Amino acid sequence: MTRDKYKEQFATAVAAAFRQVYPDIYRDVGDADIFNSDTVYSSLEKPKDARMGRFTLPVFRYARILKDNPLDIAARVAEESNRLLQVSGQPHLVRVSGVSGFLNAEIDCTLMARETISEILARGSSYGTTDLGKGKTILVEYSSPNIAKPFGVGHLRTTIIGNSLRRIFKKLGYNVVGINYPGDWGTQFGKMIVAYRKWGAEETLGENAVKRLLELYVRYHEEAEKNPSLDEQARQAFKKLEDGDTEAVRLWEQFKKISHAEFDRIYEQLGVEFDLVIGESFFNDKMDTIIQRLQGDGLTRVSDGALIVDLDDPNLPPAMLRKADGATLYITRDLAGMVYRWDKYRFHESLYVVGSAQSDHFKQCLMVIDKMETAEGLPPEKRMTGKVKHIGFGWVRFGQKTMSTRQGNIIFLEDVISRAVSLATEIIHKKNPDLKAIDETARMIGVGAVIFSQLSVRRQKDVNFVWEEVLNFEGETGPYLQYTHARLCSLLRNYPGKISPNVDYALLDHEEERRVVELLADFPGAICDAVKQYEPYLITSYLLRLASSLSSFHLRMASTAAFNF
Ligand code: ARG
């Protein structure tokens, strides 16, 4: 990772000052803690109030080891740092100030403006990127909806977060494989086949076919309550499907086709892409191999007729590979899939963007893989353990509504997107009726709002989807960012000349301009953090800060008569 030279110079000066001010303690503890510039570098924080400085080092946590009080530490170390700076002349750093237990960095804003803006002009849209991912393959699995069930909002977040991670990694030069792993296998297909034969008909599957399938699924569950023999029929139907019965397979293929047509429509609207679509059923003939491998490693045992792997975590149930009736499970397919992905790609990392509700499932998978690789004594370079990661996230809440596919009260993603677009259309008609291309603009705003809503909180937190908030042009929303972006584009379009890097940067000396420049300089760091934490939110929240700094800048400019944009 590239290092920030402002932080570097600050950390060097401050660590040296600590050594000067506290020589006895330095002699005792050595080059650890604040005496080491790397430690200082990584302990730097952003001050809550941007006016306090570019970054800050809180010294409270060192009070005990330095046997001094924080206010005095900050004052002494600041003074010594400034003395050292005068001697060594670090160009980017002007002064260190000690304020209430914090060491704040005051930097040369003109120099920062010159360096940052010239770099942006020189690098254009590659500004902020590095070649971090060169030569590395990263797998990102996301979306993975279930066949014969509608694409509900439950799969919105994985789709958006995963697609965003795919784009971020691509930008950093990784070889990214975006994987969709639809749920196209399991006992529910037995139920669907029974329901379809009893109550369905080919012609009902035209328009809105997925909704018809959902109706069949709901009806099945209602009727099965009254008539338990249906479940036995469903079991037999699934068995037939597993045995490759032509008619059962034909129906299953038909369900898949209907579902994929719907999924593709949604992906297209959301601009979501995959490099590989590989459903659960792909692993049907690959499970024996992993089962035998685990048996060969001595890791399995039979319990009540089922084949299981015991795990060394008291909080996790054993991993069940095969039920007593011989049926394999979701986890068996995932284990086969992990081995398949590793053998095929020898990835640098393989990510599973799946809701946190499945975190125990992934813990189980990863423990089984670890046990297997350990039992086989594989050398580190042949092991995928540590490279496979579950990227979890919280729920999306739409008011108080609880969702259950079985009862049919599910919110269709397609309906959410159309509602967003029609609300955006209404807003435009009200606010800007003369706009050209209203439909196209409304689509961009509506879809953008839905996408942004999923990235606007940290992924582990739940999202509360409230229409008025998501489409608010003034709040922290997608439309607000789009608006800021459109405004900047128009500014560029209307600027008559070519932007020259030979500018008197010292003129950018007001607080509002400094803030914009600082934020522009922060962009590479925001990308870096987003990648480290698999957290697109760090980019969206960064963009909101940037947009708000631009709006303050704009307000100031608008109040100076000479400038009008
Ligand atoms: N189809 C599953 C569901 O909708 C998600 C699959 C997640 N990916 C995986 N490799 N298990 O719940």
Image (cartoon, rainbow, N blue to C red):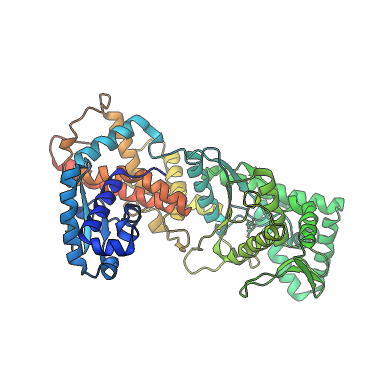
**Place of residue 323 in the rendered image (x, y in percent of width and height, measured from the top left):** 79, 68
Relative side of 435 to 272, left or right: left
Relative side of 458 to 81, left or right: right
Residue shown at the point (34%, 40%) measured from the top left: 485
Relative side of 82 to 153, left or right: left
Pick the residue in front: 460 or 260: 460
One can see residue 423 in this view? no
Residue shown at the point (21%, 69%) measured from the top left: 68
**Place of residue 310 in the rendered image (x, y in percent of width and height, measured from the top left):** 71, 70
Quarter of image, ligand 1? bottom right
Quarter that holds the C terminus: top left
Residue shown at the point (66%, 66%) measured from the top left: 406
Identify the residue at the far top of this view: 497
Relative to 299, residue 486 above or below? above
Pick the residue in front: 148 or 29: 29
Quarter that holds the N terminus: top left
Relative to 69, residue 112 above or below? above
**Place of residue 560 in the rendered image (x, y in percent of width and height, measured from the top left):** 13, 40
**Place of residue 498 in the rendered image (x, y in percent of width and height, measured from the top left):** 28, 24
Counting the numbered discs, the total is 0
